[in-house]
């Protein structure tokens, strides 16, 4: 049986590929779980239409993410923390702290989209990347200052 994959299936193939599978595997698992559709007949047409709609939605969200990235790139965030000697912080600045400060400036960012290599543990200026879309990132400056 030949099917067109609607999503990546580990060990089988990537989204959009036409693969040959055992009839039972296709009928009993892939098709009912909406991971694939039958390749013959209307299945290919259905896939093309769904793919076209997905591309359209993806382009729309990408444009919105690019606009949001331009707005975010213009801001900088200041986080006040208690610090000891040698400018070492008591604790660290996390993505949640940064998201809270961004929200105070009127921009909504999910803390899970803020990418820190490691928590910020010293005073200073840092450039932090925010992943807004699969292909769109924004960089903001984070100032960690003594409270």
Image (cartoon, helix red, strand yellow):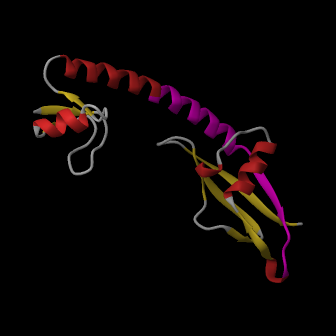
Does residue 141 sit above or below 49 in this rendering?
Answer: below
The quadrant in which residue 50 appears is top left
Percent coordinates x, y for residue 88 in the rendering: 78, 77
Question: At 67% from the left edge and 57% from the top edge, which residue is drawn?
Answer: 95
x and y percentages locating residue 114 in the rendered image: 62, 52
Q: Image quarter for residue 6?
A: top left
Task: Looking at this view, name the residue that lies furthest to the right.
Answer: 147
Q: Is residue 28 left or right of residue 133?
A: left
| Residue 113 drawn at (x, y percent) | 59, 49
| Rendered residue at 11%/40% (across/down) | 22
Total numbered circles: 0
Residue 47: % across, % down = 27, 24
In the rendered structure, the answer to whether residue 94 lies left or right of residue 101 reads: left
Q: Is residue 24 above or below residue 84?
A: above
Q: Residue at x 84, y 74 (%)?
A: 83
The residue nearer to you, when weighing 124 against 105, is 105
**Which residue occupies the foreground of this view, 129 or 109?**
109
Question: In the rendered view, would you say 32 is above or below 93?
Answer: above
- Which region of the structure is painted magenta? 58-84
Quarter holding the C terminus is: bottom right
């Amino acid at each position: 049986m030949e099917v067109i994959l609607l999503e990546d299936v580990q060990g089988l193939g990537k989204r959009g590929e036409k693969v040959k599978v055992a009839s039972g595997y296709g009928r009993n698992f892939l098709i009912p779980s909406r991971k694939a559709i039958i390749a013959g007949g209307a299945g290919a047409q259905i896939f093309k239409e769904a793919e076209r709609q997905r591309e359209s939605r993806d382009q729309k969200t990408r444009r919105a993410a690019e606009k949001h990235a331009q707005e975010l790139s213009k801001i900088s965030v200041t986080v006040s923390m208690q610090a000891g000697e040698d400018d070492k912080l008591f604790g660290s600045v996390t993505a949640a702290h940064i998201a809270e400060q961004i929200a105070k400036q009127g921009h909504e960012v999910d803390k899970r989209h803020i990418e820190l290599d490691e928590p910020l543990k010293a005073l200073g200026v840092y450039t932090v990347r925010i992943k807004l879309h699969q292909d769109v990132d924004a960089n903001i400056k984070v100032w960690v200052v003594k409270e």
